[in-house]
């Protein structure tokens, strides 16, 4: 039986409930994370992880722009959409150019931009991002907050990043994406929770937010599993990075 | 995974049981041989908050359902930042 934690006694706000839904299905993500970070070939896996991340991250600002466009169209008659526009306008600026951070990280590992851009995004990546476009454009743009709640709400622990630096032997310049997000997303996650709690969500929209978040956890776990599979021999062969410490 | 959690997952895999769970979680668990006191209260509490659509997704993900993440698990999570 699991013991009671401090989190069990938090008030049942919508954001608290959303995180409980996320954690309900988090076991595969935790397991994939552990397999990744303790893998004996972590130095081969890390560039694969960054490349997969790039496939996802290059769509972040476009999908947020799509959500902003939909929210703006609905805002006059939909108070949830109106509340979203302010948040998205600010957050789009905060997320800009993070795909460039990834390209810089990969360049520090000796992986060229052309190699990254030549990679075909997997079906899982397309499902992960494509489902957000669908919900945003054909259901309600608030769905995107479920995606962001998991992506921004669980930053890597600084100790984990230090372990990765040590275990891969790669230079710190190759860890900007993770390090910056470990710092930024502690704040972004809290801000997002406040936005979620401030929106007058109907039961249907709250369920949509939950569906989006639950799907995101499951698909991101699958993305990590695919990184592990590729790193274990069936993916690209990386040249030994020139810049190992 | 405890026997109660296996039975609970089996229960949620059945459409009729899911619908019944929405109306009467504890009663449905008992009918399907799950003693509610064998399931972590926080897990039951979260399941009770789900819509039918969310329960359907959860029934398909084929994972061990769980309540809160522990601090140790949080520390192990590799972020997938966007």
Image (spheres, coloured by chain):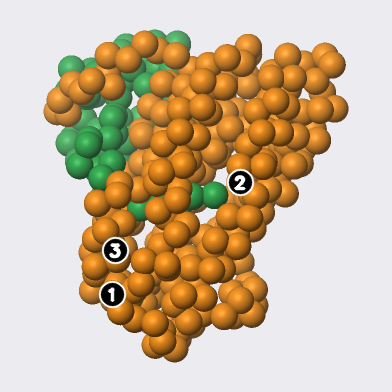
Which residue is pictured at 47% across the width and 57% down the height? A177
Counting residues from the start of the chain, the first of labels 1 and 2 encountered is 2
Q: What distance separates the C-alpha of mark 1 from that of mark 3? A: 8 Å
Q: Is residue A219 above or below residue B19?
A: below
Corner quadrant of residue A93: top right
Rounded to the nearest angstrom, the CA distance separating label 3 from label 2 is 24 Å
Residue A100's spot in the image, x, y percent? 60, 62
Secondary structure under tag 2 reads helix
**Mark number for residue A30?**
none
Q: Are marks 1 and 2 in contact (CB under 8 Å)?
A: no
Q: Which residue sits at x=36%, y=11%?
A: A11
Q: Is residue A85 left or right of residue A76?
A: left
Q: Which chain: green?
A: B
Residue A204: x %, y % from top left = 62, 19
**Quarter holding the N terminus of chain B?**
top left
**Taking A171 as reference, is A20 above or below it?**
above
A201 horizontally vs A230: left or right: right
Question: Looking at this view, is A170 or A204 the one in front?
Answer: A170
The residue indicated by pointer 2 is A95
Q: Which chain is orange?
A: A
Chain letter, disc 1 residue:
A
Residue A99 placement (x, y as % from top left): 60, 59
**Residue A61: percent from the left, percent from the top?**
68, 48
């Amino acid at each position: 039986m699991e013991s009671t934690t401090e989190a069990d006694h938090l008030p049942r706000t919508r954001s608290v409930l959303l995180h409980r839904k996320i954690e309900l299905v988090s076991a595969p993500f935790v397991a994939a994370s552990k397999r990744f970070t303790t893998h004996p070939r972590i130095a081969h896996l890390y560039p694969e992880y960054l490349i997969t991340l790039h496939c996802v991250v290059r769509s972040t600002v476009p999908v947020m722009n799509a959500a902003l466009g939909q929210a703006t169209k609905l805002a006059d008659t939909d108070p949830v959409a109106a509340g979203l526009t302010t948040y998205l306008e600010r957050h789009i600026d905060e997320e800009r150019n993070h795909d460039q951070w990834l390209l810089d990280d990969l360049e520090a590992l000796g992986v060229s931009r052309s190699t990254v851009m030549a990679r075909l995004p997997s079906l899982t990546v397309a499902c992960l991002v494509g489902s957000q476009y669908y919900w945003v454009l054909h259901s309600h743009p608030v769905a995107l907050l479920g995606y962001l709640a998991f992506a921004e709400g669980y930053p890597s622990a600084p100790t984990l990043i230090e372990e990765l630096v040590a275990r891969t032997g790669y230079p710190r310049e190759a860890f900007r994406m993770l390090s910056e997000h470990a710092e930024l997303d502690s704040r972004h996650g809290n801000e997002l929770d406040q936005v979620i709690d401030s929106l007058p969500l109907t039961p249907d929209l709250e369920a949509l937010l939950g569906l989006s978040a639950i799907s995101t956890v499951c698909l991101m776990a699958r993305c990590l599993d695919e990184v592990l599979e590729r790193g274990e021999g069936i993916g690209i062969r990386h040249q030994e990075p020139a810049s190992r410490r | 995974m405890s026997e109660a959690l296996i039975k609970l997952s089996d229960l949620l895999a059945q459409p009729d049981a899911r619908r019944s769970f929405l109306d009467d979680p504890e009663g449905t668990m008992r009918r399907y041989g799950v003693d509610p006191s064998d399931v972590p209260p926080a897990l039951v509490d979260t399941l009770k908050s789900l819509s039918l659509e969310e329960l359907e997704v959860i029934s398909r993900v084929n994972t061990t359902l769980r309540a809160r993440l522990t601090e140790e698990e949080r520390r192990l999570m590799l972020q997938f930042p966007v």
